[in-house]
Image (cartoon, rainbow, N blue to C red):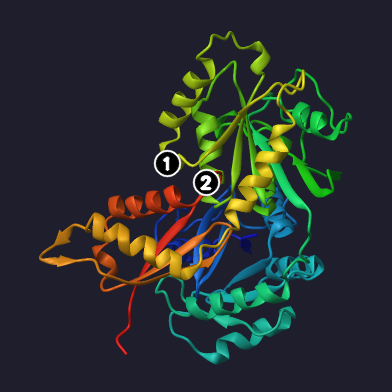
């Protein structure tokens, strides 16, 4: 499971500036006034070979009676609830405030690893850090996010907490069932479990929280996570609904496999593609379930027509597994668990290093990389360094010579030789250091 690092603190202490520096682009809006970042904003990042999800939050004003500030604080608290490590930001220029003490008290009660970050120290001095020891959160890290000073030290400390906070490995396969409201997620969960564990009505949004249910089937252990329907952002009106959407994203993050439920009558929509893309970006193996198949008018080519449409709309993840079911009648519903297990197994498959190198060397002889300014990519060595998703690292002469289209070619070569259906794979290139 990819770890989550949450950035929290009172308003206007530079959280979004730090967030943007780490991810390398201006995703969070930064203005010199409090309250600009109201929602939780996620981005994937990596530090010293350790991937994680970074989440920016609005400022926490715990004692404010203002409705807007209460909602912002609630969203930040939810980020703390789901985080593995917390970066607590304070303002080194302004110094300690009563709000900082309030947030520090709250974070201590969370019992999560906390890194205390004293921002806006454009001219670093150890003397400026002394007062922050009174927060009781350990050694403060003095940084200037605006000038990119000290960011590496903070990330070093944050990722060092990952090993300490590792969850116990469970032998149960965790499956998150996600999709738009009223696509039939809870009906599918109940069909798989064989009982009415979640409320099912025709009203979209009946399921508010992510509900974990452990069960066994054919000697295998599972945990199935039924989630609220993920609406388009502008369709989210009430606060409870908003939290449900965020918890659905968190469910995907902690799952081993995502089951993406689509209303076959309505067909694949823009929002379905957005949800599927989020699962792809998280690197999760997945199964696309076309539900309500009993209600679709059919001819002998119906499934082929649907599959062609899926391949067209999901070009970015043409490795998908799909199944056409009716949760209501039970038609083919038993295949969902089987396909989820297959996708999980494929995400954990390792290609022997010798076989991988033979495969890629042959592929590069058959179709040479394009040359750039008289230079051509040369592969020295390749290995699969991790799984879930499979990550292939290629040691080359110059990483800038790998064009995305050629990386796609190499991915296709790997997929044709080995069954990685249902799971994304990643390819990274690194320059081989001279001995």
Tell me if residue 96 can be seen. Answer: no
**Where does the image place residue 433, in percent across and percent down from the top left?**
32, 83
Quadrant placement of the C terminus: bottom left
Q: Is residue 129 above or below residue 408?
A: below
Note whether residue 306 is visible.
Answer: yes
- Asked whether, in this view, residue 38 is left or right of residue 190, the answer is left
- Residue at image x 40%, y 64%? 428
Mark 1 falls on what kind of element?
Answer: helix
Residue 358 falls in which quadrant of the image? bottom left
Residue at image point 49% right, 42% down: 319
Comparing 47 with 17, the one in front is 47
2 and 1 marks in contact (CB < 8 Å): yes
Mark 1 crowd level (few <14, some 14–19, many ≥20, 10 Å Cα): few
Near-viewer residue (32 or 421) = 421
Query: How much space separates mark 2 and mark 1, taking CA atoms?
Result: 9 Å
Residue 261 located left or right of residue 366: right
Q: Quadrant of the N terminus?
A: bottom right
Residue 138: percent from left, percent from top:
70, 83
Seen at 57% across and 61% down, the residue is 387
Could you tell me residue 251's position as x and y percent? 69, 47
* x then y, percent, for residue 350: 55, 62
Q: Which residue is mark 2?
A: 280
Query: Residue 316 shows which numbered tag?
Result: 1
Which residue is depicted at the point 64% across and 43% down?
258
| Dot label at residue 83 | none
Q: Secondary structure at mark 2?
A: helix
Find residue 431 and report its image quarter: bottom left
Pointer 2 or 1: first along the chain: 2
Task: Relative to 107, say whether 95 is above or below.
Answer: below
Seen from the viewer's position, the closer of residues 84 and 344 is: 344
Label tally: 2
User: Around disc 2, counting alpha carbons within 10 Å, would you say few (fewer than 14), some (14 to 19), or many (20 or more)?
Assistant: many
């Amino acid at each position: 499971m990819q770890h989550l690092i949450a950035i929290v603190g009172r308003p206007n202490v530079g959280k979004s500036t730090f967030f943007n520096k780490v991810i390398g682009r201006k995703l969070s809006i930064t203005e010199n006034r409090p309250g600009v970042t109201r929602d939780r904003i996620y981005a994937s990042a990596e530090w010293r070979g350790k991937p994680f999800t970074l989440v920016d939050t609005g400022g926490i004003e715990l004692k404010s009676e203002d409705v807007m500030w209460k909602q912002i604080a609630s969203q930040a608290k939810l980020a703390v609830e789901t985080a593995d490590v917390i970066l607590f930001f304070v303002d080194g220029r302004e110094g300690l405030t009563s709000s900082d003490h309030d947030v520090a008290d709250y974070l201590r009660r969370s019992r999560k690893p906390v890194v205390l970050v004293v921002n806006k120290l454009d001219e670093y001095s150890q003397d400026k850090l002394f007062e922050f020891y009174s927060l009781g959160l350990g050694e403060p890290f003095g940084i200037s996010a605006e000038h990119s000073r000290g960011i590496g030290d903070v990330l070093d400390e944050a990722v060092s907490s990952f090993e300490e906070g590792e969850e116990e490995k469970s032998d149960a396969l965790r499956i998150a069932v996600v999709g738009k409201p009223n696509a039939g997620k809870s009906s599918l969960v109940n069909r798989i479990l064989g009982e009415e564990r979640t409320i099912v009505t025709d009203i979209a949004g009946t399921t508010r929280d992510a509900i974990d249910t452990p069960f066994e089937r054919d000697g295998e252990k599972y945990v199935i996570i039924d989630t609220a329907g993920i609406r388009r952002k502008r369709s989210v009106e009430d606060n409870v609904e908003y939290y449900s959407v965020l918890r659905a994203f968190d469910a995907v993050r902690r799952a081993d496999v995502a089951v993406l439920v689509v209303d076959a009558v309505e067909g694949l929509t823009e929002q379905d593609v957005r949800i599927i893309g989020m699962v792809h970006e998280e690197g999760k193996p997945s199964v696309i379930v076309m539900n309500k198949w009993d209600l679709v008018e059919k001819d002998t080519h119906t499934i082929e027509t649907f599959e062609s449409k899926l391949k067209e709309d999901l070009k970015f993840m043409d490795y998908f597994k799909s199944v056409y079911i009716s949760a209501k009648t039970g038609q083919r519903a038993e295949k969902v668990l089987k396909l989820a297990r297959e996708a999980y197994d494929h995400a954990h498959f390792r290609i022997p290093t010798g076989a991988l190198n033979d495969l890629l060397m042959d592929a590069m002889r058959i179709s040479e990389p394009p040359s750039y300014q008289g230079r051509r990519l040369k592969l020295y060595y390749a290995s699969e360094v991790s799984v879930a998703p499979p990550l292939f690292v290629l040691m080359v002469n110059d990483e800038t010579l790998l064009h995305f289209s050629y990386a796609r070619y190499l991915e296709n070569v790997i997929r044709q030789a080995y069954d990685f259906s249902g799971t994304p794979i990643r390819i990274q290139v690194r320059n081989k250091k001279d001995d």
